[in-house]
Amino acid sequence: MKLNMPFINDLVVKEDVCNMCCKYCLTKTSKFKDNESVKAQRNSLVYTDGSELQKNMDAVTESIHNAFGISVLKISGGEIFLIKGIMDYIRKHAPKYKKVQLLTNGVLLTPELLSQLKEIENICLQISIDHHTVKGNRYRTPTPEKLQRILGNLDHAAQSGIPLEINCVLHDKNTHLLSGFADYLMKYKGHVTLFPFPVRGKNKFDFYQNADQLCGIEKLINRYTDFQEILPPKAYLEYLLRFLQTGKREIPCIFPKIAIGSFDDGNITPCANYWFSSLGNVLNEEPQTVFKKVNTDKIYRILTHDRHRPTECTQCFTPWEILNLYVIGKISIRELKRLPLYSFDGLEEFLSDIPAKETSA
């Protein structure tokens, strides 16, 4: 592992293929790929020996790992468990990493699948759910049937012992109800971490909460001692509240320096949070030609500039902010390593070469 090089590979697989239709979904509004190329990806959802998806996923994953000695692999979609044979991919590649994080909407997270995942020791799960009620989760599941299925699978996942994060997108239907969701999740304390973060994308203001609804976050902060067993560090929640109050970020972002965004079609992007542009395609070009641009291309100066950044950057907040807060000294290494994804040896080394400047973005 080279310092000041990415140690996270954020791999997106078949981003347009999902069994839900969340109203605020980022994929619908992304211009990163044209419509024709997205439609073409629907043709194959099979990872098996000799399949196009198998060849592509293996080539992308291995080229990035070989180039950078990646320690954390995150896999998301779309919905990755729609891919037939995805467990073969996970079993094949997981041993190379310190941590592997899987993002899912939870619909297909059956006890049988959880049993297979449990056998892989370095797996962490992320389940996307905004609330335990139809009212609070209506942008994801407007009817109770699918929500109850997800909650049942969440229960199985928590009881399996697999480390679990809850990706909770905040909007005008759930922000004021957030402490109630925390109360609900307390039965899984020690197994679950609730990560609330704002809705994103160009249509985000269609879903934004009003100022009065921020009381839900304030309640979590005020009752932090009661909920701390299922919450990220308090500094994360305090910064989240300030971000929603002011509408812009206050701290630098190191994420493009430590993470590489990749896609199963070979595209590599300098930021895994927003798909601004492609550095190249490792399936169509010599991988080293593409990787020479990582942390050197002029786009990185734009994305990591202290003040003059794209609007998408100044208005961005994701669970990865936890790393930004650590680098500027707001979160201790002990707090960071309490979170399952970051509980591995060598994390301090990966982050030590990043300038820890607390400057306004």
Image (tube, rainbow, N blue to C red):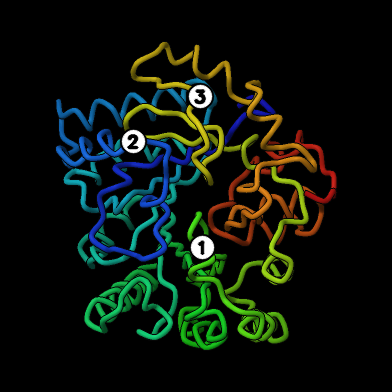
What residue is disc 1 on? 204
Regarding mark 2 in the picture, which secondary structure is present there?
Answer: loop
**Residue 121 seen anywhere in this rendered image of the structure:** no
Quarter holding residue 308: top right
For this rendering, which residue is in front, 133 or 189?
Answer: 133
Q: Which mark is residue 137?
A: none
Residue at the disc numbered 3: 279
Does label 1 or label 3 sit earlier along the sequence?
Answer: 1
Which amino acid lies under the numbered mark 1 shown in the image of this protein?
A: Lys
Residue 98's place in the image compared with 121, above or below, is above
Query: Quarter-wise, where is residue 23 in the image?
Result: bottom left
Residue 92 locus on image (x, y percent): 30, 36
Residue name at image x 76 percent, y 33 percent: 353
| Residue 128 pos. (x, y %) | 41, 65
Point 60% across, 27% down: residue? 1
Residue occupied by mark 2: 34
Classify mark 1: helix, strand or loop: helix
Q: CA distance from mark 1 to mark 3?
A: 27 Å
Mark 2: few/some/many CA within 10 Å (<14, 14-19, 20+)? few
| Residue nearest the observer in this picture, 234 or 296 | 296
Where does residue 171 sit, x and y in percent of width and height? 51, 73
Asked if the residues shown at circle 1 and circle 3 are in contact, with their CB atoms under 8 angstroms apart, the answer is no
The answer to which of 138 and 74 lies nearer the viewer is: 138
